[in-house]
Image: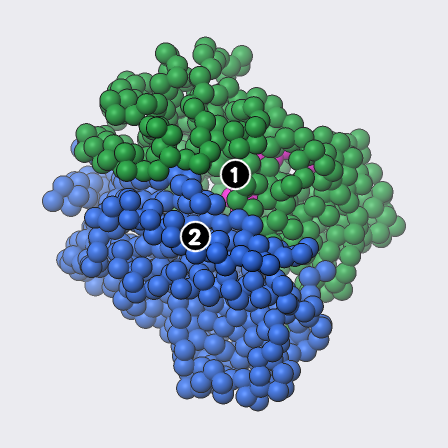
Amino acid sequence: MFDEDIVLEALRAAGSLGADYAEVRFQRDKSYSIVFRDGGLEVYGYGVNEGISVRTLVDGAMGFSTTDSLDREAIRSVAKESIALAKAQGGGSIEFADAPTYNISYEARVKKRFEDISLDEKLSYLSDLDKEIVSLGNDVKVASRTLMLEYTLTSKVVATSEGTLVSSVIPRFAVMAYIVLSYGGRSITRFVGLGGSMGWEGIDVWRPRDFFVENIKALSRVVRDAKEVEEGKYDIILGPETSGLAAHESCGHPFELDRILGREGAQAGESYVTIDMLGRKVSSEEVTVIDDPTLPYSYGFYLFDEEGVKARPRYLIKNGVVNEFLMNRETAAVLGLESNGAARASAYNREPIVRMANTYFAPGDHSFEELLEDVERGIYLKSFGEWNIDDRRYNMRFIGQEAYLIEDGEVKHPLWNPVFEITVPNFYARIDAVDRNLEFYPATCGKSDPGQGVPVFTGGPNLRVRDVYVSKIV
Amino acid sequence: MVELDLEGLAQDIMRRVLRFADDCVVLVGSSKSHQVRFSQNRIDVAKTWNETSIGIMMDKDKRVNVLELSLPSVRDIDEVLEAAEKALLSSQPRPIYAELPEVAAGLKRGVSVVDVRVRDEPGRLIDHVHTAIEAVKAAGARRAAGSIRGNYVSLVLASSRGEASLFDEYTNVYMDVRAFLDGEETGHASQLSRGIDGIDAEALGREAGETARLNSRPIVFEPGRYDTVITPNAAASIMNLAARASSAFFFLMGMSFFAGKLGQSVGSDKFNLIDNPFNPNSRLPRLFDDEGVETRRNVIVEDGVLKGLLHNRFTAKAFNSGLTGNSGWVVPHPWHLEVGAGDYSFDELIRELGKGLVLNNVTYIRFQNYVVGDFSGVIRDGLFYVEGGEIKGAVKGLRFSDNALRILRNIVALGRDVKDIYHWWLEFGTSVSTPSILVKDCGYTKAFGY
C-alpha cells in the first residue's frame, strides 16, 4: 500500500538518523460539507487534508514535524527535521510507558456510503427538512435556520519504531442545525445535531427530522410560555444532553493526566484534580463516569489510538470513587502505569495529546419517573445554551434552554434561562440518582495550541442533583 | 525539499476548472511554521509544519462549489476535478448570487513584512523560551508555561476575472507566557509581532511573573456589578465577539448581536472599531482577500454607531453593499481589529475607576443567545480589587457574566496603552490592537459552593 510505504520510509529515515523513538502517522481526511441556509444552498464543499507527521524522542526531548508533500525526499527531510528539533533542546526528561505492539488493520463499515448518495438526494433531504421546519412557525417565528450535513472519512496509518503498524478507516457523519426562534421580544438561538460513525444510513437510524421537529416544537413553547425562574434552592434533573456536558467538562477534562501534570498550563489549563485523589470518594455510589472510544457507531469511535495503543473503556469515576485518569504513553510513564489509549490528534499535522472519546455517566437502575417522584421543588434542565468552566475545571456553569419547573413530582411549565453555576466537587457530592436512559449527541471537543477539535459523543442518562442554587441571567 | 511553482499550480488548476465552470478562483498557500511549547519550566515539544493548501471556488449558472485540498490531491487532480464537475452540475443555484469580482492588479506593499529568520531559524524560538522561563522565575513565580510560534506564509491567487496572478508573502510571531505561583495564582502576558526581534521574551516573562505575584492569596469576592478596567488581554477576547458579530454572514445567520442595528448606536460614543490589515503587527497583513479584492481599512463602529459590516461578494449583494475586501469564500471576516485608543494612561484609568475591579484575562466565552448578546466568560490570570484609585489585592471565585452590547455601551474611558494581542483562545481567531478600557457596571456571578 502506498500509505504504508511512505510511513515505513519515514520510520526508516528517523531510525537511521538516531531517534531513540520514532512514530510516524499518515492521515487523510476526506470531508464533505453541505450548508443550506433559509431555504437555499449556501455552499457545497469538498476537502481533502492529508499528510504525514514524524514524532521523535532524542535524549528525552521531543520533536514533531509534518509535511503534506509525500515524495521520498520530503519524507526523509521531515524525519530529519523532527530529530533536529528534538536535539536542539539539549536533552529532556520525557519517557514513554511500555506498550504492547500491534500489526493490525480495522475499518468501521457503513451500510450506505455517503459518497454514493447523489447530491440531489442530499439537497432534497435538506430542502424537505427546511420546509418542515418553516411550517412549524406560526405565532412563534422561525427567524433563521441553517442546516448542515457534515461527513468525514478518516484513513490513518500509525507506525512506531517499536514495531507497531496500525491502519484504520473511520467514517463520521452528522446532521446539524442552527435555528433562531422569536416570539414577542424574546428569542432563542439553538445548535442541535445528531451523528455518529456511520454513513447515510444514519438518516434512518437517528431520524434527525423527527428530532429537530420535536426540538423546535419544545423550544417554541419555551420562547412563548416560559416563566421567569424564581431564584433559590432546587433539586435539579439533568437531561442526557446536559448530563453529557457535565461528564465531559467536569470529569473528562480534569481527569486528563497531561492537564494534571501541567503540560496544558498555558493553554487549556491545569486541573483541580490531583494524583493523590486516585481512590478517593467524590460522589455517591450511584455515580460511574466512563470514557469509551470503543462504543460502536459513536462519533468518538476508535480501537487504537495515535500511539498504536489498544483502546478500552476508561472508568474515570467508579461507584463514586476516582478510579483512573486519561493517559497517553508520556503521562502514564510519570505514574509508572500503562497508557489507556487516550492519545488522539485531530489531523495529520497535529501532535497526539491526551483526549476524551465518548464520555458519559453510566446508566443507573431508576426510571425517569422515579427520579421525578420525590422532587418537591425542582427543575428539569433538558438542554443547555451557554456553558463554560474554568481552566482548573473547578467552577462550572450552564444555562438551561429547554427547562421546566418540577413541582411535587410533576413536570410543569417551561422556565426562562435558569442559570446553574456550581463548583465541581459540590456538584458530584450532590448527585443521588441516575436513570436507565442513554442518549448520545455528536460534538467537537477543543483543546491545545494549535487548537485540535476531535469528534466525541456527549450524552448519557438523566441524573438528579439535590438541593442546589439556581439563578437567572443578570 | 523541492520548491513548488505555486503560480504554475494555481494557473494550471484554474485552466482545468474553466473547462466546465464559468468562473473560478484558485488560492494556493504555502507555509512553514515552527512552534515551541513549554510547561513546568521546561520545553515539552518543538514542532515544524510544512504545508501547502489549495482552495478552489467555482461558479456555473449561479451554482457555487468550494474545494479545499492539500498537496497530495494534485497527483489525483483529474479525478478530483471530474468529481467536482459532477457535483457542480448537480448543485443548486444560490438564492443570492453575485459574480466573481474583477481582481485587483499590481498590488504591492511599500515595506516588506517578511522576517525570513522566522522560517529558517527555529532555534531562535527556543532561545526566547529559555529567556522567558528565567524571567518568570526571576520575577518570583515558581513555574512557567507557554508557547511561541512563528509562521512564514506565501500566497498566490489566480482568478478567471484577472489576467495576472496575485502574490503575497508575510511572517508573524506570537508568544504567550503564563506564570504560576500556585493553582489559581497565575499571571499571563502575550505579544504579537511581525518578526523575531519584535518579541521581548524577558519582558513577557517578567510581566507574567509579576502579575502572578500580584495575584497571590486572592480572596473570595461577592458577585454583583462593578465598574471595571479591562486590560488589553481581556479586551482582545471581548472584541473578538465583535469580530464575529461584524461578519455579514453571521448577521444573516442570526449569530450576531449587531443584527438589525446597522446605522444605529451599538456602543458608547467613545467606542471606535476598525478592521485594518495594514496595522504594523496585524497577524494577517493581507494585500487581497480570497476573491482577489484589494483589502482596505474598514470602519465597523464609529463614535458608537455601527457603520458597516464585512463582506464577501454574496453578503455584499444581500446587503446591497460594496465589497470590503474581507472575503472568506463562505464567511467574511476581519483581518486585524483596532480599538480606538483614548488619552488615559493605565494608572489614570485606575484612578478614574476609583472603586471596582481590574479584569486581566477572560477566556471560554459562550453565549446563551447570539442575537441578544448574553454571554459569560471564565476569568483567569488576575482579577484585582481597586479602592481609592489603587489596586488593593486579588480576588477570585467570580465569572464575567454580561451582555456584549451593554459592555460596549458602558465604555466610559479608553487608555493609550495599546497592545497587539493574539491568543490561541480568541473565539474568532482575529488579532486585536486594543488599549485598556474602563467599563461601568460589569456583571459578575459566583458559583454555588465557591
Q: Is residue A33 left or right of residue B297?
A: left
Name the quadrant containing residue A396: bottom right
- Residue pictured at 61% horizontal, 49% vertical: B371
Residue A455 location (% of width, % of height):
37, 56
- Residue pictured at 35% horizontal, 38% vertical: B92
Q: Secondary structure at mark 1?
A: helix
Question: Relative to the observer, which residue lies in front, A212 or A91?
Answer: A212
Residue extending furthest left?
A1
- Residue pictured at 43% horizontal, 52% vertical: A131
**B184 vs A411: above or below:** above
Q: Is residue B427 magenta?
A: yes
**B163 vs B333: above or below:** above
Q: Do dots 2 and 1 share one subunit?
A: no
Q: Is residue A204 magenta?
A: no
**A379 vs A174: above or below:** below
Q: Which mark is residue A435?
A: none
Question: Relative to the observer, which residue lies in front, B345 or B371?
Answer: B371
Q: Subunit of mark 2? A: A
Residue A253 location (% of width, % of height):
47, 62
Looking at the rendering, the stretch of residues picked out in magenta corresponds to B423-435
The shade of chain B is: green
Q: Secondary structure at mark 2?
A: helix
The residue singled out by tag 1 in the image is: B249
The residue singled out by tag 2 in the image is: A131
User: Type of residue at label 2?
Assistant: Lys
Question: Relative to the observer, which residue lies in front, A258 or A48?
Answer: A48
- Residue pictured at 21% horizontal, 56% vertical: A112
Chain with blue colouring: A
- Mark 2, mark 1: which one is toward the viewer? 2
**Is residue B297 visible in this depiction of the protein?**
yes
